[in-house]
Image (spheres, coloured by chain):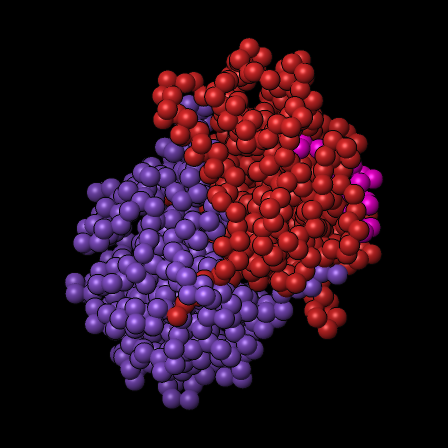
Chain colours: A red, B purple
Amino acid sequence: MARVNENFLKLKAGYLFPEIAKRTLEFRRLNPDADIIRLGIGDVTEPLPRSIVSAFKKAVKEMKKKKTFHGYGPEQGYDFLVEKIIENDYRARGVELDKDEIFVSDGSKCDTGNIQELFSVDNVVALEDPVYPVYVDSNVMAGRTGNALSDGRYEGIVYLPCTSENSFNPDLPKENVDIIYLCSPNNPTGATLDRTALTKWVDYARKHESIILFDAAYEAYITDKNLPHSIYEIEGAKEVAIEFRSFSKNAGFTGTRCAFTVVPKNVNANTSNGKKVFLNGLWNRRHCTKFNGVSYPVQRAAEAAYSDEGKQQIRSLIELYLGNARMIREGLASVGFEVYGGVNAPYIWVKLPSGMDSWRFFDKLLNEANVVGTPGAGFGPAGEGYFRLSAFGESKRIELALKRIKEKLKL
Amino acid sequence: MARVNENFLKLKAGYLFPEIAKRTLEFRRLNPDADIIRLGIGDVTEPLPRSIVSAFKKAVKEMKKKKTFHGYGPEQGYDFLVEKIIENDYRARGVELDKDEIFVSDGSKCDTGNIQELFSVDNVVALEDPVYPVYVDSNVMAGRTGNALSDGRYEGIVYLPCTSENSFNPDLPKENVDIIYLCSPNNPTGATLDRTALTKWVDYARKHESIILFDAAYEAYITDKNLPHSIYEIEGAKEVAIEFRSFSKNAGFTGTRCAFTVVPKNVNANTSNGKKVFLNGLWNRRHCTKFNGVSYPVQRAAEAAYSDEGKQQIRSLIELYLGNARMIREGLASVGFEVYGGVNAPYIWVKLPSGMDSWRFFDKLLNEANVVGTPGAGFGPAGEGYFRLSAFGESKRIELALKRIKEKLKL
């Protein structure tokens, strides 16, 4: 008799974005003529840069001829892409990595969801609250938590509150934790961890032999020159940190699918009898056993993100989105909202008027201004009382959304 | 202090194909002028069909314009593809499925590796021996086995030997098993399970409330009109079976990446206190949490596999590979080998002369004929004494390989 993994049953109702989609669909059913503006899901809206499309098309054409056809590639990604990653994302910032420390994949959601498989079920997980829900959900599924508590937390997880009170810069935990998820620039708060904050975490991890899982999917939005883009810019991080990067939010690959994970060869964890095991080999084994590489034309498209033309086109995209972010920040501030983020990140984190529940604000914003945003509570209990707006979208539509918020939202 | 998942440490040395690559590379280093013919890895060699490339290119072009750009799609795949799958792969064979029973993914390796997450760690797994190594390796990683035994088996797994003695049609297990992996047409033996054999398994699963994980990645190679292509052609299978399909081996997508998994809504498993849980919802949750959909242009390319032109071009590809298979079967039989498979599958399963070890034959074939094949032992202990040759390759090269085997191999 087959038995299910009952950890799945601990998961609370629907993953955040499907729930938003459901409520929006229901609103549309009842209001078929409403002009809904979506500032909810963190999906890019600008097309792929021209130079990337060119490279993509060229690689598709290669698939038509026997001589240039590509079947299975290396599970870890082609050297042509890995070399560009090392050169541009790391060496340019003073970080040296070897090719076999980079693992190309089809998405950071997959990688951040799968990475926990390398660890035993009894590790204590700490994560920022609020944060991207995949970290906690994937650990719930794996049995690394107890049940959901009434406040939305899961037993056994150490939540690191990030609120306006601590400037969204979480304190070190009082208890010992083994695995620490950090997301910087943070989704959803838009806050970034500076060199001092990251050093604090790296030092903690070295002292406690913990592992930092560092999600840098939004690093391209960093405008402040003093902020690190990679955790490996911090002394000692190559012994304790795994870093996740994506082409989704810089090059617009949300529907094209390419990302990568860095597992430096010195990062290790322990067996129950104290033997060190290097995680690079473990992740390589996982990657080769349960993954078969990223589509060849997609890897060629990703490679083009590092051409001079590609870099310039990506820079323009990011400036466009950051311009939207500034507009949202200023628009909301002008009607009295307390706003955070949106400077080094495409997300604006809005503090709701005291006592306002974030799903209630979701419904209110949808009903009164026909604008879709993302309830802060969906990212963790400390997100309650906040709301995420995304800078992905057309400037004109965002302008219209702000106009409606100013005129129609009854606060 | 972070602790590793020690189940990974139970895994035996390198996954099969990396080991083959390593030995081949070493041979090339020592014999830089040797003309190696690769009949080892099951990778297609013919380019993508023209109609598929056209659709692929067209979709890439759509990504260049705001109006036709695609960001995140549904994690489960676009309706345009799901509808074609239902119509052509199932309805055409008398099987009715709903759209939300199909989950498009980037590969069957991923799906067959990930599916075990839905089950508790104490399920007893049965699998054909020999078979595609991902099934056993993913269960080892999850802790569903004990240690590796000296004969290559893992403690706790129920192996179902498939040898020439039982015509590669495994017997039902004597013990109760909860999860049963079946691969038909089988990789590596090339054997298919007919209606009677599949009915036997479906009846077993219904009686014991087991789940069948049915890998049909090679169904397009079935030439015998009486053989089922889908397990759902068997009465009652929609209550107990999950089916895996891929575009890799029919449409040549090994480097393009698209596959799908069917989880009918009635398939269920139990909680520890006897409650039924439907696996469709669980897989949907897993898919939405740890996966972000297949590249949009790749899904358009896969859709084109179902156009009239696409189907015809795929048919020609398969005939070409099956022609190679016949050549290998006949060539090896003519020098006295006992050969199996190669009729409804692209793999030829060669019985080695008595007492010949399959890795030793690998080295011998490489050294004497400069031909790379796959040692049977790599697919499971009952594969020892056998060797897999793949029909993927150029007819002329296969002819040359056979000539060398006839002239140079010292048996």
Which quarter of the picture shows residue B194?
Answer: bottom left
The picture quadrant where one finds residue A266 is: bottom right
Query: Residue visible at 44% across and 80% down?
Result: B381
Residue B31 versus residue A142 in the image, above or below: below
Q: Residue at x 77, y 54 (%)?
A: A175
Left or right, B219 with respect to A46, comes to left
Please name whichever residue, B231 or A146, is drawn nearer the observer in this view of the structure: A146
Closer-to-camera residue (A104/A310): A104
Q: Inspect the magenta stretch and tell me whether residue B68 lies in it.
A: no
Decide which of A138, B368 is in the foreground and name it. A138
Residue A203 counted in the magenta span? yes
Taking the image as shown, residue B323 lies to the left or right of residue B152, namely: left
Work out which residue is located at the far left of the displayed protein and give it.
B225
Segment tinted magenta in the rendering: A189-204
Residue B209 in sight from this viewpoint: yes
Image location of residue B95, percent across then percent down:
22, 54
Q: Position of residue B366 (x, y in %)?
A: 46, 73
- Residue A86 visible in rendering: no
Position in image of residue A87 (x %, y %): 68, 42
